[in-house]
């Protein structure tokens, strides 16, 4: 089973396109931090509660020593505390980090942490038959129009691959 640590941006993207349930059907052990959950609004948190309740989502808690380590963590991109918390957790678990944040991506590359974003998650859902071609393309088209930080060229290329089957 693949271990992944998910940040706020990926959860929001998956909620926006309505694929949170299929995401948790992937063969991933999904972790996040309490700081990510705290960044979500009440409605978004309520969408995660069923997955936390059945332990499909593990919300890792940090003790005082770990909080101090995360606070002191030096990063090239000047990441927020929440971003550093998921980076720390990914390092600790030797997990893949799921994020749409460019600063996190740069930090993952420099630290040799496997990194993917929302587009990759949609691709995995399609490849594993959890999303059909039409719903996958619909999700990608939505993200292309509503999430300007995602690379449009990558989205367009994936849409073409899905169309070709």
Image (cartoon, helix red, strand yellow):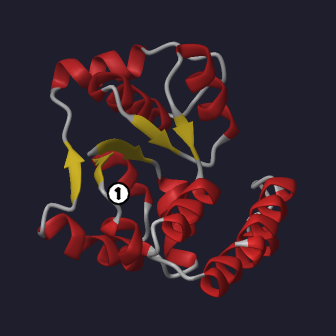
Question: What x and y, as percent, mark residue 91?
Answer: 37, 23
User: Can you identify the residue that label 1 sits on?
Assistant: 37
As drawn, the residue found furthest toward the bottom would be 134
At label 1, counting other C-alpha atoms closer than 10 Å, the crowd grade (few under 14, some 14-19, many 20 or more) is some
Q: Which residue lies at the image location 78% right of the left edge and 61% below the top edge?
A: 155
User: Considering only vertical position in the picture, is 61 above or below 152?
Assistant: above
Question: What x and y, as percent, mark residue 158?
Answer: 75, 62
Count of marks placed on residues: 1
- The image quadrant that residue 118 belongs to is bottom right
* Image quadrant in which the C terminus is located: bottom right
Q: Is residue 32 visible?
A: yes
Q: Which residue lies at the image location 53% right of the left edge and 65% below the top edge?
A: 127
As drawn, the residue found furthest toward the front would be 165
Horizontal side of 51 relative to 156 (left or right) equals left
User: Considering only vertical position in the picture, is 136 above or below 76?
Assistant: below
Q: Is residue 82 visible?
A: no
Question: What x and y, as percent, mark residue 119?
Answer: 64, 58
Q: Which residue lies at the image location 39% right of the left edge and 21% below the top edge?
A: 71
User: Considering only vertical position in the picture, is 75 above or below 3?
Assistant: above
132 and 95: which is toward the camera = 132
Horizontal side of 124 relative to 147 (left or right) equals left
Q: Secondary structure at mark 1?
A: helix
- The image quadrant that residue 37 belongs to is bottom left
Q: Which residue lies at the image location 43% right of the left edge and 36% below the top edge?
A: 96
Question: What x and y, as percent, mark residue 49?
Answer: 23, 72
């Amino acid at each position: 089973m693949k271990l992944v640590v998910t940040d706020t941006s990926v959860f929001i993207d998956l909620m926006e396109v309505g694929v949170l349930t299929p995401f948790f059907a992937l063969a991933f052990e999904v972790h996040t931090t309490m700081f990510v959950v705290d960044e979500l609004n009440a409605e978004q948190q309520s969408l995660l509660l069923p997955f936390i309740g059945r332990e499909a989502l593990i919300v890792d808690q940090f003790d005082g020593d770990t909080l101090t380590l995360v606070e002191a963590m030096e990063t090239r991109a000047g990441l927020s505390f929440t971003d550093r918390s998921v980076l720390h957790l990914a390092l600790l678990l030797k997990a893949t980090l799921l994020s749409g944040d460019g600063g996190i991506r740069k930090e993952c590359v420099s630290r040799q942490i496997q990194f993917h974003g929302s587009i990759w998650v949609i691709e995995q859902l399609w490849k594993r038959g959890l999303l059909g071609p039409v719903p996958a393309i619909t999700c990608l088209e939505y993200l292309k129009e509503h999430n300007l930080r995602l690379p449009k060229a990558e989205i367009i290329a994936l849409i073409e691959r899905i169309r070709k089957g």
